[in-house]
Amino acid sequence: MGKVPAAGDGRRETDASRSAAAARSSTDAGRCSLTAPTDLTFLPVIQAFVRAFASRLGFADRELGDIDVAVEEATTNVILDAFAPGEEATFDVTCERVPAGLAVSFRDMGLPWDPALAPTYSPEADLRSQDGAGLGTFLLRRLMDEYEFVNHGVKGKETRLVKYLEGTSVVPEGDEGEGAVEGGEAAAAPAAAASPPGPAPQPAVVSEIGIALLRPEQAVEVSRCIYDAYRYTYVNEHVYYPDRVVALNECGDLVSAVAATADGEVAGHAALIFKEEVRDVAELGIVATKERFRGHSVATRMTEFLVEDAERRSLVGLSVTQVTAHPYSQRFSHDRGFRDCGLLLAHQPASVSFKGILEERSQRGSAVLGFRYLRPRDGGEVFAPAPHAEMVARLYDGLGAAVTVRDGGSQPVPDTLTSISSTVRSLARVGVVAVGACGADGAVRLREHLHKLVRDGVEAIELSLPLGDAATPWLAGEAEALGFLFTGLAPGGADGDGLLMIYLNGVVADYDAIVMDDPATRDLLDYVRGHDRLA
């Protein structure tokens, strides 16, 4: 990579240029990394490096200014707080193109840090009562669209920042609609709610409707289709930005099926949604049919199209998240081979509405997780907590999976480390904790993540424990002692199946408002409610 001119005065630029050999970079089409010394005189070089990458992606001057400030704050944190004064070390800054935006990560091997212990800065508080502590993190969250801290254990720690391009939203300025959801969602997992059957108020006179993969020019009509079905309450903010819809399809995180009339009008949308590192299982979601096209089997045909696409990709299976405010999406899924396997209590904010079905509610809504195997699941064993092993076995039977369920497991091997991560779905106010391997420090690490998410104000925390790990029953017991509640299982692909648990932070599950279509799922609901100490 050629030399990047530094911002700032000429002396710093000259010093940085002379020490250019101290910084190494590697590039590919959408990723570029820089290794820099822990020396604040290199701050202009790092800012120029990130600014140059961001400029190539199309960020405007005002956005570049926000990125500059965020990079300065994150770099200063690493140099001043992660290492002792005068300590010679390096850290990595990586720029990466993400769908419709930029991700910048700062990774170092310095002092361990727990963000849960960081002070909280409140701009509303009396200035005389504050000393500025916590202002840096506050600025990072305000200036960037996503802020995430990742502890890599013996491999150091990482701060990851994401900024999205200011694409044109279908949301008119100043018109957010009833029960609007504010922007800034990081990486919300969409909740699938197929449009209910029944006559539309104004039945459409329709020409033949065809189903095909998304064409870029259709993206704006797809966003308007989501608006028609959900107004501005859909928890995945990306669907209201046509450019992001296109970018997510181009990188493969989404596979959108679009229903369109012969004259080009978009009648519906559905998608396969892939997680970043899991490509053999997808979620079927973002299902929406324009109100005037309901009753024309649009959702059915889009679903069949995507199932066939998933089979061509040799996926292990598909999941679907079904609302419980009404039975329509559950019936729709059951008719297409999905079977219920878990509850997501308080999964949706009260602001989420379904036009023509449920216009408003006062409490958070719950959801049901469904799954359909596209390949037979024969063999294998899982380790379930003894109190719930029978229910886990029943759920696997309902899925048609021939799995051996072990009643209990073993303690983790001494000195082993837990693989754990957590994310926040900002609009939904849901935290997601995923454990990849249970180590001897599992209870401590889980408690740390729980406390941080509680401090962040999330209202529901969803925990997944690896059922293929013999230490999971032990860690599940520790989780229950912390207040987590067993709610089912989440089948997976290469990463294995997960034991699903929920922690409610200041909210109570409204069991009486949960509508279940399948008697077996009502049994699971009664089972979960019977173990909920707050019910």
Image (cartoon, grey):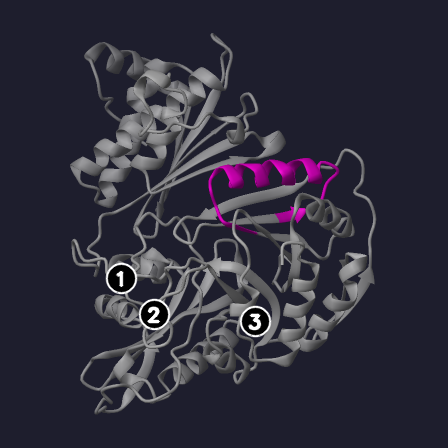
Name which of mark 1 and mark 2 comes first in the sequence.
Answer: 1
Q: From the image, state whether disc 3 or disc 1 is nearer to you.
A: 1
Q: CA distance from mark 2 to mark 3?
A: 24 Å
| Residue that badge 2 annotates | 359
Disc 2 packing (10 Å; few <14; some 14–19; many ≥20): few
Establish if 266 lies above or below 364.
below
The three-letter code of the residue at mark 1 reads Glu
Disc 1 packing (10 Å; few <14; some 14–19; many ≥20): some
| Residue that badge 3 annotates | 370
Query: x and y percent of residue 120 in the render?
Result: 43, 28
| Residue that badge 1 annotates | 178
The three-letter code of the residue at mark 2 reads Glu
Name which of mark 2 and mark 3 comes first in the sequence.
Answer: 2
Span highlighted in magenta in the image: 435-461
Q: Secondary structure at mark 3?
A: strand
Check if mark 1's residue and mark 2's residue have beta carbons within 8 Å: yes
Whether residue 315 is visible to the viewer of this picture, yes or no, is no
Q: Quadrant of residue 246?
A: bottom left
Q: Secondary structure at mark 1?
A: loop
Q: Which of 319/251 is in front?
A: 319
